[in-house]
Image: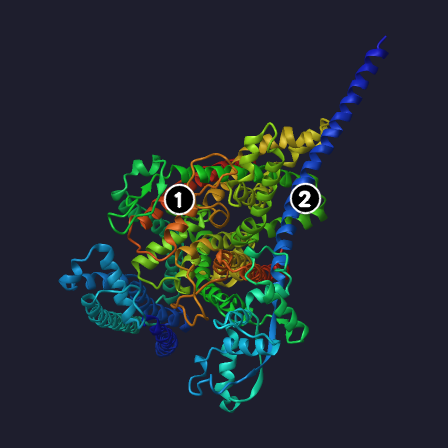
Amino acid sequence: MIWLFLPVLIALSALAFFGGREIASRRAGASAIKAHSRPSQHGYYALIWVGVPALVVLLAAAIFSGPIEQSVMQAGAPDSIAQLEPFRRDAFFNDARLVSAGQQPHQIWPQALAEQLTQEARRYGDLSRLLSLGCIVGALVAATLGGLFVYTRISPTLRARNRVEGWIGGVLFTCSVVAVLTTLGIVFSLLWDSLRFFQSVPIAEFLFGTQWSPQIAIRADQVGSTGAFGAVPLFAGTFLIMLIAMLVAAPIGLFSAIYLSEYASRTSRAVFKPILEILAGVPTVVYGFFAALTVGPAFREAFNGLGALMVGGPLDGLGQYLMLVQNQMALVAGAVMGIMLIPFVSSLSDDIINAVPQSLRDGSYAMGATKSETVKRVLLPAALPGIAGALLLAMSRAIGETMIVTMAAGLAANLTLNPLDTVTTVTVQIVTLLTGDQEFDSPKTLAAFGLGLTLFLVTLLLNIVAQRIVQKYREQYD
Amino acid sequence: MSVAPVKARTDRLQAGLKARYARERRFKLYGVMAIAVAVGFLLLLLGRIIEQGHTAFYAHELTIPVYMDPARIDRTYPQGTNFQLLVAEQQLARFGITDDAQGTQATAMRTLLSSELKFRAAAMIRENPALIGQTVPVTAPVSDEADLYYKGEITAETPSDQRRVSDQQMAWLDQLKSDGAVQAKFNSALFQNGDSTEPEQAGVLGAVVGSALMLLVTALIAIPIGVGAAVYLEEFSPRNRLTDLIEVNINNLAAVPSIVYGLLGVALFINWMNLPRSSPLVGGLVLALMALPTIIIATRSSLKAVPPSIREAALAMGASKTQTVFQHVLPLAMPGVMTGTIISMAHALGETAPLLLIGMVSFVPGIPGGLTEPTGALPSLVYIWENASERAFHERTAAAILVLLAFMIVMNAAAILLRRRFERRW
């Protein structure tokens, strides 16, 4: 509704531009003083004063109208609804919103509440129409006031260009602040919901508990009504898969970087570097599909076959175990994730190895060292901190990676370090807890924010450390 | 006197040299092997997906004569007729098979026909009610399982718990084929339909439109803000605590796991601002926040590449700082900016995890009509189909991946072309 006003706003701004330009050139023509700025710069000045205040009003409306509607609806709700449990009440208002938008409610309400629902939906419709109307009037008033202000200001002596440039600087600064606001948004939204989660589950139990079964029953007398939120199995699973991925990605990525930067001819470098980049550009959901339908079954068959060979021999127990290995195992997710990380490790290491000054290489060759000796004894020690930073960045990627593990690692929260077992990770559990139809306020969904906060803090720490190392190392040779 | 020790030393050196050269060759071999593993894996990945997906691009259609039985078809409500059963019974009669009282055979025959048959027959009647009472040929896809049989993915050797086609149904399908009633055709449903629970009617168009709407929102928000922020940081910002903080911030944002952005989307856009779940608007906003740091970083590096002499020349001619940046520096940096932007958009197109959290895992039939309507997206469609139990969805998942990859290849190729065409070396 509010957004329909945007074309009007654009038209108004255009009018302001042409009007401002016209008025400026007339006033300059009538005056004896030589104008400071050109007419079109006055036009931009007018455009800014008409467009920006109205846009600010609209943006504020878009951001705050939801929460305002919610609180007004809750404040004016009849007692029968105000007395509902919080989860039910939120679901009720959600449905009222759906009904007023002409859609079907999500839930079936008892007769008394269903009548209330249509009533509340009507109230909601009135409220949101009133709010949008208010916003549009507000935007129009803001635009008019801005226009009047500009009308009185335009004169040959007005330094319109400098003012417009000041505004542009301000807008650009605002753009760069958006990045900071995003971070703040992430921190606050994760913290807010995590704090609500930690009110029902103690933080110590979350961080050190070894039982994870987030099913919470709707009725109190149901079996297993208290969910367990001990996240240690998830941390262990995440760590295990990250470790396997790094065991694959670190050597392969590092060796391909060394080969590409030290050994490869110009042409083969021109061929293989883009191929590695393609590997980096493949969406993770594709890797997940490949892991689940190709690598998983292939590994299972290989292990089952190996197990069948061992059964009856001296390693009978191991054979029996291998025969029962399933498609979803930590090894599959870890190996495929490792492949995904190869280009990441190799391109970062490539940059770092290339940054080592040529003089170090030349010195080593002059002493009669072979290429591999130069790499091992001179380049790698010199590049070591940078490579360590690159590996840390890759680790943070592996921890935060979601699709491969969601599709190939499984859901069972086993506390194990066996790569052939099914494990689950922090990201898999976030996806599982937040997908599907459920209320957004139960401890089950809030747990996802607790996990998200942990994930965010760990990856942030890894990134900061890694970037410090990489930065510091780069400066050494600059 | 000194000949012997020198010789011994050179011998030792010679032997050592051999070992050193061997080590050198081994070391180089490790490098070659590492590259080979990466390249081999890429080929394996693409090969497997093409192998699994290419069969989804064609499908088998059945052309069958239908007697539009006036006793069974309601003239005013033709879509209420069970055309599949009608056709199945007529086909059984043509095969000369008599059915039992429960209609077991007719049910078995009916499951070989797609429900698309019903829609097409009903549409024909609605268009021309005079067809009732006549026998007209109707063309419709066969059911997903029958299609898999024709493609040879299910055979008589397939264990019966892994297929839903009985031996008898296979015999019928063979007979229909030898009668010339079955043709393999390009699977246009895959590109013309939205998602469906019936694999033979499921298509990617809904998801493609959803992804396009989302990318539109992302581009409209992320590109202006990202370029603006980069211009500020590179050209205008004074060096102080605040801008340092912003810089560190942006570098860290680029490395935040994508799923965290999904959580932000749930908390901020859905729970707090009450925007509609699984809508392209919310998806686009989340992807915009995600793409922002990469766009800023790419734009900054291409602004850095513009030599200071350009700025100095413009300033010397009396241009203001703003005029210098917007009339000289930014246009020269534009090819690099565009390249970086397109690549980050392609990346956003393939991003899945945040979309799952904002509700794009739910089944959305049809084609989305607007920014606030529930919709699917290509990567989340891959995820949904991968989890589907019908076997025919497997090949369609791979086909959807191929469509997704095709879009990404087009975008990346455009970026490379732009770079080749307009890149300037100073």
Q: Position of residue A271 (x, y in %)?
A: 68, 50
Q: Secondary structure at mark 1?
A: helix
Q: Is residue B356 visible?
A: yes
Residue found 36% across the figure and 50% down from its top: A186
- Disc 2 marks a residue whose amino acid type is Ala
Q: Is residue A253 visible?
A: no
Residue hosting label 2 = B36
Q: Residues within 10 Å of mark 1 (few under 14, many from 20)?
A: many
- Disc 1 marks a residue whose amino acid type is Phe
On residue A456, the disc is 1
Compared across the picture, whether B162 is left or right of A68 comes to right
Compared across the picture, whether B260 is left or right of B415 comes to left
Subunit bearing disc 1: A
Q: Front-most of A43 and A159?
A: A43
User: Which residue occupies the extreme bottom position in the image?
Assistant: B130
Q: Front-most of A440 and A66?
A: A440
Subunit bearing disc 2: B
On residue A367, the disc is none
Q: Quadrant location of the C terminus of chain B?
A: bottom right
Q: Quadrant location of the N terminus of chain B?
A: top right
Q: Position of residue B280 (x, y in %)?
A: 42, 64
Q: Secondary structure at mark 2?
A: helix
Q: Front-most of A102 and B412?
A: A102
User: Which residue occupies the extreme top position in the image?
Assistant: B1
Residue found 54% across the figure and 55% down from its top: B161
Q: Residues within 10 Å of mark 2 (few under 14, many from 20)?
A: some
